[in-house]
Amino acid sequence: MTGGQWAYSPHVVPFLVSALVSTVLAVYIARHPRTDLTDRTALTLTVLLVLAAEWSVAYLFRLISVGQQAKLTWVLVEYAGSGFLPVGWFLLAVEYAGYGSRLTPRRVVLLTIEPFLAFLLVATNPTHQLMWTDVQLAMVGSITVLDRAFGPWFYLHIAYSYTLIVVGSVLFVKAFVGSERPYRGQIAALTGAVVAPFAGNVGFVFDLGFFSRIEFTSAGFTVACAFLAFAIVRYRLLDLTPISHAVTVGNIRDAYVVVNREHRVVYVNPAAGELFDVDPGSIGGSVEATLPIPTELFVEWESEPIRREVVIEREGEKRYLDGVVTPIVGSRMRGWSVIFRDVTERRKRERELRRQNERLDEFASVVAHDLRNPMNVAQGRVALAREGSENEHLEIAAESLRRIETIIDDTLTLARQGKSVGELESVGLQPVVEQCWGIVSTADAELTVEGTLTVRADPGRLRHIVENLLRNAVEHGGDDVTVRVGPLADGFYVEDDGPGVPDEIRGAVFEPGYTDSRGGVGLGLTIVKRIAEAHGWSVTLTEGRKRGARFEFTGVDVASSGPREPAGDGGHESRTE
């Protein structure tokens, strides 16, 4: 600056306006509540505008400063902003297009190496002349400008900057093709924002007529800011920054919805659009106005995914949706992502299954009732006929009638109780076993209950399991069989010292209709397995300590337990007669 004087000119007005507009917009974006799901997009926009304002101010002072050295000083200040603007544009494009996860700190630093080198080369150009080989002062109207002969690194720097701008623009075009409203409007505005500054720079670098002497790149930021302001106001750029399709999985079959913390819908995938009949143009509206789902799904203080069932009305028919609401949380609450799965058909099948079970229960009750009446009559007549008689045929008939009664009871149990359980309670195993032992006809059999165990179970169903197993042990092990019941690490066992069950038929004994050597129908063990499965337990048949049958129940919710043995281990016997 010669003598501290300034050469004022109307040429500086566009650059002054550009600096003011860029600064105001940068402050607005920085102070705007960031309700979008990616803070980095808003942050990158703010940094870009600050760099643009810095470039405009520096170029303004370069124009009005007097003297070659003063103008070259402001060129150096310009490069502090202008050199990094293409990098910022590229980062914005990468973030917006959904590849922000690839922007590691190391990669960002690598991208800034060339602009930093260019800044250093401008500062030291007199020693190497890589940025320009000659510089002169020239008059353009009433203002003095620098007329430079550019050096090799300048063109390398321009090639690098233009590459970043072009690649970033290509990413925006690619995002435009795969996007819906209002994101297409945002992308068009962002792409338009880069055109004016880029055109001014190309005209200056390649000496194109009007642009050849005064560099209007920074003045073009006024136009760029107008595009950005339009995108912010019309297309809600700061509120609806899209999430990457790589994250949202736009082509998944389930309905996928993203809601920001202001309860505005910021994304719906095609499946959600079809399910909820959502117009892509309505994205950005409130949940109440856009989707037929309650806002109560979105609870700010929930930090873990929650599952909710939602019922909607479509074409006069109720649709049942299974929704999983996942909070999107960073340094603060950002919003929610929701996956909805249409379970209407499953619900229909469940209702049909319940109706079938109800019909089966009704059928079993009717059949049992109709069978019991003639059976009771037959039992009574046989009992009368046996009075004072030792007729062998009457003995066999009485036993057959008792067997029919057992089959009726087992069939009713299987139809009514084999699939579900009632309310679970803490049940002591020993009292249940001793109670059932008093009910079952045990002849000279002996019972040993080892250890103590309390389980979470339906008391009535647990008694059915124990009764069937005790009856099975006595029937197959003989009148003098010994039955042992005790705890396991995660359940309990029931075993006897009878003849056991051969390996080749152990899996079959749980099947309905399995017939033993004495002609039994074999529903008892089927009932045992069904009730165990209804509790969420597993039951296996193995060999006992004395080669008898051993039934092990695992996966049991054990409330408390005394000394126990691991599954499959004979352990130690504590016998009580």
Image: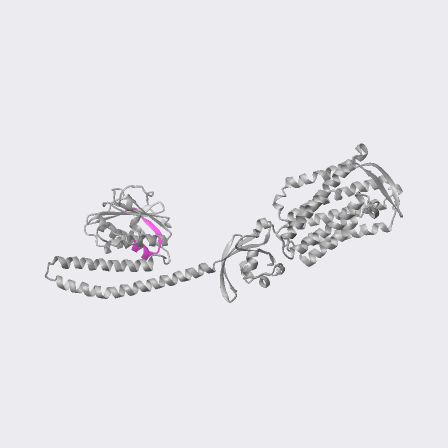
| 107 displayed left or right of 564 | right
Residue 267's x, y, as percent? 59, 55
Verify whether residue 462 appears in magenta. yes
Report if residue 184 is visible in the image.
yes
Verify whether residue 236 appears in magenta. no
Coloring scheme used: one colour
Q: Please determine whether, in this image, residue 203 is positioned above or below residue 421.
A: above
Q: Please determine whether, in this image, residue 334 is positioned above or below residue 117.
A: below
Closest to the observer: 33 or 530? 530
The residue at the far bottom in this view is 316
Q: Quadrant of residue 298?
A: bottom right
The magenta segment is 449-465
Seen at 62% across and 43% down, the residue is 102
Residue 194's x, y, as percent? 73, 49
| 194 displayed left or right of 285 | right
Q: How many marks?
A: 0
| 141 displayed left or right of 316 | right
Q: Quadrant of residue 76?
A: top right
| 277 displayed left or right of 530 | right
Residue 53's x, y, as percent? 76, 48
Closest to the observer: 91 or 562? 91
Report if residue 431 is visible in the image.
no
Closest to the observer: 338 or 565? 338
Residue 561's x, y, as percent? 34, 47
Q: Please determine whether, in this image, residue 472 is positioned above or below residue 377.
A: above
State the quadrant of the N terminus. Answer: top right
